[in-house]
Amino acid sequence: MDTNGSSTDSGTPHPPTGIKVIVVGAGFGGLGAAIECHRQGHNVEIYEAFPELKTLGDIISFGPNGGRIFYRWSNGEIAHRMRLLSIDLRKYGFNIHKYDTGEIVINQPTPEYSVEAPNFNGHRGELHEVVFNYAKDLGIPSEWLNILFGTPVVFHLGNRISSCFEDDNESGIVLESGAKVSADVVIAADGVRSKARKTVLGYEDKPKSSGYAVWRAWFPNEDMLADPLTAQFCNNGDTFNGWIGPDMHFLFSTIKNGSDCCWVLTHPDEHDIDESWSFPGKLSEVKEAIKDWDPMCTRIVSKTPEDVLVDWKLVYRDPLPTWVSPKARILLVGDSAHPFLPTSAQGATQALEDGVCIAVCLRRGGKKNVPASVRAHERIRYDRVRATQKTGESTRDMWHKTDWAKVKENPEIIQFPRQDWIFEFDAEKNAEEMYDEIVKEISKL
Ligand SMILES: Cc1cc2nc3c(=O)[nH]c(=O)nc-3n(C[C@H](O)[C@H](O)[C@H](O)COP(=O)(O)OP(=O)(O)OC[C@H]3O[C@@H](n4cnc5c(N)ncnc54)[C@H](O)[C@@H]3O)c2cc1C
Ligand SMILES: *[C@@H]1O[C@H](CO)[C@@H](O)[C@H](O)[C@H]1NC(C)=O
Ligand SMILES: *[C@@H]1O[C@H](CO)[C@@H](O)[C@H](O)[C@H]1NC(C)=O
């Protein structure tokens, strides 16, 4: 094992720090933080509301900056497993259509697959299961394994927290049962409806409607194959097509060698907000919304079983002024700190980057300097996360306000943006490089 912080080994490349970390939530944000804290030598316990894992959700994306993190787990094994579940567009690329005529204005090629920094688009539940099982494997309590690989990650499923607390020396959680558990630091990855957020901010932060909602569906390919006009999307490997129109866009992909189908249709919506994933949708409403669009869109939608259709209200939150509690022993990460619009395709990846960064900062600061490390984390991350969040709005607006005459002259302007500053970023290396300087800055405040 090497000690430069970039080991790909599943064990901890660092000696134990003695820092006790409570992670709230076992989504990608929480699992990532737990795994990374384990890698950096901390003792980790996860508290998660769900009593057992279910494969929930539909399509989710990870950029290469997320793939780089997964690749370090278990010598590339986790990334490999995720790859097998993810869309493979090396042959097909991304066909971008004009919404009404259906013409393909450009085929955006897929970049070469990078083993060390892969990107993944696949079923959220299936990919989550891979990561969940890996984190669980790190939790097998066995004395000789502990000696070799560090203290195991301990899981407490079926444990919903109701609040957090802190003083100068420790922080902790209060479970719904009333039980209290304390630690050196609480990393709250409890999603958009975070309970920890209130302790951190001192007030309830209400979400607002973003003005959009997304109809989403994931279903098997049988009916698609049975129709000669739609079979092309499923009988020759994976595909990805997008129809871009005024104030709406429809993205359709086939995954796992064309066997699964998935579409998302972003549309204006001013309804009251329910931050829920399981809001049922109506096919008739979807068809009404796209009645003037390329008939292929309706054809694809018609193959969707109504019971898998979800109408997900896209909420927006003003950026939180801080992710850190007053005594800096509670930190919000992932969606609890910064929900993303799907058009950024970076929400889950930024949640992962958070976990990497805080794990490094805690190790660098040591058990005596937890608050300084938590504050350093926020300073290292804040501007990057904000800038990445904004790409969700800019890409959406770019698509929804397309000037088709300009696209005719230069079709490349409608491509999904791929930004090096997002993708080529190594969260672990960055945290290691910035830590000392940032801590110095903070100590001068
Ligand atoms: C069921 C579900 C389905 C999703 N489906 C998709 C999808 O299809 N596509 C997509 O792009 N994104 C989806 N997301 C969101 C996506 O996973 C996140 O945007 C991203 O991965 C960042 O993750 P996170 O860990 O910060 O938050 P989340 O993924 O929301 O994870 C938060 C976790 O915290 C747990 N939790 C919440 N409150 C408490 C509490 N009080 N006590 C203990 N535990 C608590 C939740 O059960 C959950 O496991 C889904 C999220 C969920 C929870
Ligand atoms: C924190 O620890 C110090 C030193 O052990 C002690 O003096 C102080 O009272 C503690 N503070 C709280 C709030 O428990
Ligand atoms: C993918 O599916 C096609 C048929 O749709 C089949 O011919 C091919 O062998 C499959 N490839 C793999 C790798 O499973």
Image (cartoon, helix red, strand yellow):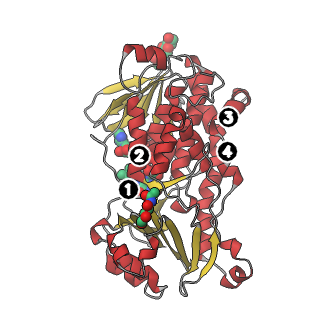
Q: Report the residue that reaches farthest toward the left.
A: 177
Ligand 1 lies under 8 Å from the Cβ of mark 1: yes
Q: Height in image: 16 above or below 26? A: above
Label 3 belongs to which residue? 429
**Residue at the spot of label 1:** 57
Real-space CA distance between mark 4 and mark 1, rounded to the nearest whole angstrom: 27 Å
> Residue shown at 55%/16% (left/top)?
15
Circle 2 residues within 10 Å: few <14, some 14–19, many ≥20: many
| Label 4 – label 3 distance at C-alpha | 9 Å
Kindly identify which residue carries mark 4. Answer: 425
Secondary structure, mark 1, is loop
Instruction: Please name the residue shown 45% across and 65% down the image.
Output: 254
Q: Which mark is residue 128?
A: 2
Residue 287 in picture, x, y percent from top left: 38, 82
Q: Position of residue 146 (x, y in %)?
A: 43, 17
The N terminus sits in image quarter: top right
* Dot 2: element: helix
